Structure formats: C-alpha cells, structure tokens
Image (spheres, rainbow, N blue to C red):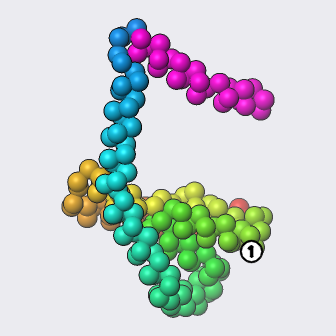
Amino acid sequence: MSILTGISVWLIPLFIATVLVVATIKRVPAYEAFVEGGKEGAKMALSLLPFLVGMIVAISILRSSGALDAAIGLIAPFLAYIGVPSEILPLALIRPISGTAALGMTTDIISSFGADSFIGRLAATMQGSTDTTLYILTVYFGAVGINRMKYALKVGLLADLIGIIASIIIVTIIFG
C-alpha cells in the first residue's frame, strides 16, 4: 500500500513535468496553451450552467411536490412482495437523474441502516452499477449540440434498469 501511496504522490508532478519537457522539446508555448485551454473550459462551464440549473430545479420539484413519495407509495407493496426494501426506491428513481442527489440518498441510507446491512450494501451496489443517464444526456449532449437523443435515452434508461435489477439479484444472492 505504501508503494501505491508513493506512486500517487509523485504521479501528477511527474506528468506535469513530462508535459513541460515535451512542450519545450517541440517548442510549444505551454503556458499560453494552458491559458487558452482554461478559457475554453470556462466557456464550456458557462454553457452548461442552464442545463444544470434546469436539472436541479426538476429534481427539487420532484422531491418537494411529493411526487416521489407518491410513486414510492404505489410501488412499495409490490416491492415488499418480492422482498426488496422500499427504502431503496428513491435511490433507484433519482440515480438516472442526478449523481449528487443519488450519492446523498446513498449516504442517508447507509447512515440510517449501516454499511453492512442488506439495504446499505444494496444502495452501494446500485450506486456503482447504474449511471446518471439523464444528467449525461442533458449536459454532455447539450454541450455539443445534439438535440435528437431518443435512442441514447432509451438505451441509457434500459441500462440503468438492468443495473438496478442486477444489483438487487446479486446483493440478494450474496448477502440476502
């Protein structure tokens, strides 16, 4: 472990030094290129801001309006019948929308039930087995100007559903 720690401490400074040496050899103005890259990054961040605000507002409305609780109330009896804790449902619904909100929910679940509990392990596995599909489509597709994303949306949400189901099955088999 100490070897990995030593490598990780020196890896980034060595990478930067390598970039500077290669830039010097190729006679590339490294600092000016860095500043231009920073300007492009700032422009990209500003162009992403409306998409992020829209996503945050949508999530807040979903949670504050009670729509999320209503959806959980409808599905909870079925989940209880198949042996899946209903406390995991908000995570499954929010994960494709926002990684930060899902991480917050995972943290709440683990704080409430414990990291070694079935639901804690299920939440952690679900967090790692799914992706933030709607966030990715909104931000990254919006950043490059892709407007027609119907197949990407379908495939992404299907992959999330498969990840959720696989998480439940695997955690139930291993820890259930």
Residue toward you, 29 or 139: 29
- Reading the image, the residue beneath label 1 is 112
Point out residue 156 in the picture as x, y percentages from the top left corner: 38, 61
Q: Position of residue 47 (x, y in %)?
A: 31, 54
Residue at x 69%, y 64% (from the top left corner): 121
| SS for callout 1 | helix
Q: How many marks?
A: 1
Is residue 101 found left or right of 40 in the rendered image?
right
The quadrant in which the C terminus is found is bottom right
Q: Where on the picture, by quarter, is residue 30?
A: top left
Is 19 colored magenta in this rendering?
yes
Q: Residue at x 40, y 15 (%)?
A: 23
Residue sitting at x 32%, y 40%: 40
Query: In this view of the protein, which residue sits in the foreground, 48 or 146?
Result: 48
Looking at the rendering, the stretch of residues picked out in magenta corresponds to 1-24
- Residue 161 in view in this figure: yes
Q: Nearer the viewer, residue 107 or 76?
A: 107
Taking the magenta stretch, the answer to whether it contains residue 65 is: no
